[in-house]
Amino acid sequence: MAIDLALAWIGIIGFAVIMYVILDGFDLGIGILFPFFPTKHHRSLMLSTVIPVWDGNQTWLVFGGACMYGAFPKAFASTMPVIYFPMIMMLIALVFRGVAFEFRMKATRSMYLWDISFCLGSSLAAFSQGVILGTYVQGFGPVAPSYASVPHYQWLTAFSFMTGLGTMCGYVLLACCWLVIKTTGPLQKKAFLYGKYACIAVAAFMLAFSIWTPFLGEVHFDRWLRLEKIIYLAVLPLVTGILFCVNYASLHYRKEFLPMLSAIGIFLCGAVGIVISIYPYIVPHSMTIHQAASPQHALQFMFVGACISMPVLLFFTANSYYVFRGKVTKPVHY
Amino acid sequence: MDSTLLSRIQFGFTMTAHIIYPSISIGVVTFLVIFEGLYLYTRDKIYLSICKFWTKIFALTFGMGVVSGIVMEFQFGTNWGGFSEKVGSILGALFTYEVLTAFFIESGFLGIMLFGWRRVHPYLHYLSTCMVAFGTTLSAFWVLSANSWMQTPHAYRWDGAGNLVADGWWDIIFNPSTIARFTHMLLSCYITATFLILGISCYYLFFNKHTKTAKICANFCIIAGCVLMPTQLMMGHHVGVVIHEYQPIKIAAMEGIWETQRGAPTILFAIPNQKTESNDYVLEIPKLASYLNTGDWNAKMVGMKSVPKEDRPNAFIVFWTFRLMVGAGLGMLFVAYLGLVLKLMNRHLTSKIYQVLCMLASPLGLLAIETGWMSAEIGRQPWAVYGLLRTSDVASQVSVSQVMTSLICLIIVYGLIFGYFFTKYLLKVIHKGPDRDMDIVEHDALAFNYMSTFKEDDPLDTNKGKSNKRKPNVD
Ligand code: HDD
Ligand code: HEM
Ligand code: HEM
């Protein structure tokens, strides 16, 4: 039996995106949280929890981008120019965020500068990612955009701003859950508290997102609010709701690992929802996965590499988390 | 101003910034592999202190390489949509392999290499350093393979819709110029690092600071330079031969040859003039270019005039960047061998003049890398994929205002971050220098924080290392 390689690649890209959102999500969330943790010691500790792993986390973004480029070049070429501005904004923000790790350790007097750079960079990167997500879910109209005539400012809508803010809250939630695992004492206490706020905010944004999405257009409405589908689609909101309750309760009762697990569950539910809105399109709702895919032999060539190296890479990633396991009680340096 | 031109400026600008950091990182991490190996072998702390110091500089450049690299990748989509669509199934596949085989290896071991001294066994730490070095080298391989394919496309087919698709992956990865250009580039990275390290060591020697470590490094670098420079000269020559075969117009621009002729001269100095299609103020060695490119003094060299104007690259830029690269190479060759001669007279580490010369020569490697890339890339114009796709046909038609905004933002941000702050912190690290006395370390946690985490127990003291592994964070 031949596997449908285009679908397999969607699976791999989906996996990469989810890995990225969860792993870099807590990195970026920590940056967004910085203003709420004003003491230098706390900030150093928070940074120390991610410094040894942030580069690996970000690599999932690079991976997702490269796979998109290689496996679905037509979709990559069609959508990227449309989201030109938020994309460049995200890249610049990631520059500010990334250099802050290095520079902060080398700075003495100007440390506050890199705190600001870390916070603003993380916030803007998270916001831009949300805007990109919103633009994408909205769709690009009845015909797929072309690089030769790029529609301007399609990303500039109320919906995409809403998803931008929602993404920031989501990342904050992940960051709090991460800090709960990695820290102790007053820092952890604060993480529990802010985690609960973030949990409520994320729930509100997800609700708004779910109510808004069906009214974005005919296609979206069709998918979510046709009677015959509504029954089994109702399962998703139900599961998400339960996960939110679990998340809140686990933060309230100071469990250490359950908050992270349930938060990941919430993000997975969100991802499933987005897939339902879009599948089988890759440029919603004008270019399908198969229309955008590279020729079969290219997919095959890449697939062989992915099958061989992905398990090894996951092992490396796990190993590096394993080496740096445990609570961080003292800032790391190199 | 159209958005294509702006995109070209933006891509060239961000690329020029990006390449600085990978080149230094690849060279320095290779240096670290050697010195950490020496440390494990001899267990002499002096090597450890050298490793610790250069790891700091490596961490700094590596961080810059990562953040500027991500910008590169996504610009293919945002600014070069047509390029992505038409060759994505080929180049995208190579970039995917780059991430799969190189970036994940780098990032998976980077944390351990930088922060894992006390957490893992010394040999595992050494393995991490080696893996990072391996990863960076592989990433250079993939990106050069992709770039070489753009220069000398091979094993492709046109599909029905005007896109290029692969016809044999092996031949794409190892296209006619891959091996030559990859070797040339890798040597460039080593050379760049060698001369940076030599320059910084001579700076310490000049001011009589950290002389013990500086002497070791300077000696090592002079030997390395003496080996690397002639190799690079031969390799550069070989690249030229390959390029002459596949991109004759580019070589014509590099050599400043307008008319197709036999026994073409090597031009030492000239101002190529695009309007009159000739060179002004020429100083030349007869017949040498024909000989260098083909091995025959009277061989025929194609001139730029053999193709229409719109198919030629900018003659002036390609000509001069090429000369700067070769000039820098010859300059470094001279410095390395002068060092060898002085060394044989046992004068090299005492001669103040030589020390100053080394300091002046330290940025030459970077200069050669930048100008080498510029002559290779601008020499490829007006093609994005040589002879197949025109740059002007594959750019995204994003609104001029958006590209202008992004370009201005990038220039400001890069200038600030990579230009000002990177230099500032680099100089700060260099100014503080490596540590001579391992005991000072404990008292100066801020300045030598890298060592302070380490000092509490010796990584080679395996018993202690083991007991420490159990409780990594709770000190
Ligand atoms: C000679 C080597 C070389 C060359 C010519 C390039 N790069 Fe590079 N690049 C590296 C060598 C490298 C590296 C040494 O492997 C880096 C530096 C830091 C790192 O993580 O990897 C890197 C980083 C790096 C990253 C970040 C990876 C990460 O997050 O770990 C990306 C996305 C790119 N590069 C992409 C590009 C693109 C699109 C290029 C050209 C068009 C390019 N690089 C030219
Ligand atoms: C690392 C050193 C590199 C430098 C310094 C560099 C420099 C440049 C410059 C200056 C330009 C603008 C040329 C012009 O418009 O006249 C350019 C264009 C370009 N380069 Fe590079 N380049 C490098 C590597 C690469 C690599 C490795 C790739 C691809 C894998 C690449 C792909 C391109 C593309 C797609 C363009 C834009 C389209 C074009 O103008 O052809 N470059 N580069
Ligand atoms: C001294 C004799 C040298 C010769 C004859 C030489 C020759 C060449 C040639 C012909 C190219 C063009 C390749 C192309 O168009 O694709 C090139 C590119 C390049 N050179 Fe050199 N080179 C020399 C020295 C150096 C040195 C010392 C360095 C750096 C330390 C260097 C770095 C580069 C780089 C980075 C490129 C662009 C990448 C590439 O195209 O592979 N070169 N060189």
Image (spheres, coloured by chain):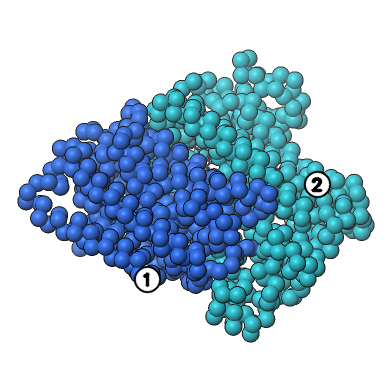
Chain colours: A blue, B cyan
Query: In the image, what residue occupies the spot 62% across and 38% down?
Result: B416
Question: What amino acid is found at the position of numbered circle 1 in the picture?
Answer: Lys
**Disc 2 is attached to a residue of which chain?**
B
Residue B68 lies, in percent from the top left, at 54, 45
In which quadrant will I find the C terminus of chain B? bottom right
Tell which residue pokes out farthest to the bottom in this image: B463
Q: Which residue is mark 2?
A: B359
**Disc 1 is attached to a residue of which chain?**
A
Query: In the image, what residue occupies the spot 91% across and 55% down?
Result: B350
Q: Which mark is residue A255?
A: 1
For residue A217, above or below residue A249: above
State the residue in front, A70 or B268: A70
State the residue in front, B318 or B68: B68
Regarding residue B372, the answer to whether it shows in the image is no
State the residue in front, A89 or B279: A89
Tell which residue pokes out farthest to the left in this image: A228
